[in-house]
Amino acid sequence: MELKYSPLSPFARKILIIAHELGIISRFDLQRVSTRNDAEKLTCFNPLGKIPVLVTDSGAVIYDSAVICEFLDAEFGGHRFIPASGLRRWEVLTRVALSDGVTEAGVTIRYERARPVSEQSSSAVDWQLKKVRLGFDQYEQLIQRWDGNLDLGHIGIASAIGYLQMRLPELENMKPWPHLKAWYEQQCEQRESFRATVPLE
Ligand SMILES: N[C@@H](CCC(=O)N[C@@H](CS)C(=O)NCC(=O)O)C(=O)O
């Protein structure tokens, strides 16, 4: 399988974490792609020009990250990270949407701040920052009832924390979300799958 990715991408990190957890990382041909410089190489696989993109051994092209994670979990994980059916499936998928939404809002802020200063909009940043904060607020509640099972929603919010706490000083190193911060440091950062996928600048 080929994974078109960047080691900095929090969306790609979810896939790498799952691949490590499931013991299938060696099956991946990891191809680093720059969404800016390799745009054409990417859009012929994903017209949206976004990473991650998975190309399976049979040549099927799969994106986006949530779909790739579900594919890997169904094919190799026995639905360990996303239940196959029942109410819990919809609960997990809703939290996946929340964690991906937080990440997307954070990435949008990064893109806004990469524009020339004169073109940046502080109200656009504040709009996205509110989504990040409210998403973390919700996970701060949820994590206090955590049953010890890591699912794709948890992996997604942990990837968001790993990416955003370094990049958005407004998040004050996660101090406003003490339970979430402690969970991340004690339950996630200690796992081999997280240590092996720390985003590299
Ligand atoms: N919903 C997508 C989002 C992926 C995404 O936004 N990836 C970023 C890199 S972290 C990207 O490719 N950005 C390039 C662009 O937006 O043109 C997913 O979950 O895969």
Image: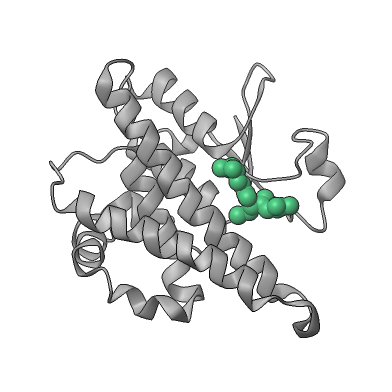
Residue 6 in sight: no
* Count of marks overlaid on the render: 0
**Whether residue 185 is situated above or below residue 101 in the rendered picture:** below
Question: Where's the N terminus, which quadrant?
Answer: top right
Residue 181 in sight: yes
Which residue occupies 62% across, 73% down? 123
Which residue occupies 50% across, 55% down? 103
The image shows residue 24 at horizontal and vertical percentages of 42, 33
**Whether residue 151 is situated above or below residue 117 in the rendered picture:** above
The image shows residue 92 at horizontal and vertical percentages of 32, 33
Q: Quadrant of residue 7?
A: bottom right
Q: Answer left or right for 78 relative to 104.
A: left
The image shows residue 177 at horizontal and vertical percentages of 26, 68
Which residue occupies 28% across, 61% down? 189
Q: Answer left or right for 149 relative to 46.
A: left
Which residue occupies 58% across, 61% down? 107
Q: Residue furthest bottom?
A: 118
**Whether residue 101 is situated above or below residue 165 in the rendered picture:** above
**Whether residue 47 is situated above or below residue 123 in the rendered picture:** above
Q: Quadrant of residue 86?
A: top left
Q: Answer left or right for 84 relative to 53.
A: left
Pick the residue in front: 155 or 111: 111
Question: Where's the C terminus, which quadrant?
Answer: bottom right
Instruction: Name the colouring of the figure.
Output: one colour
Q: Quadrant of residue 188?
A: bottom left
Pick the residue in front: 41 or 104: 104
Q: Answer left or right for 152 relative to 30.
A: left
The image shows residue 105 at horizontal and vertical percentages of 54, 58
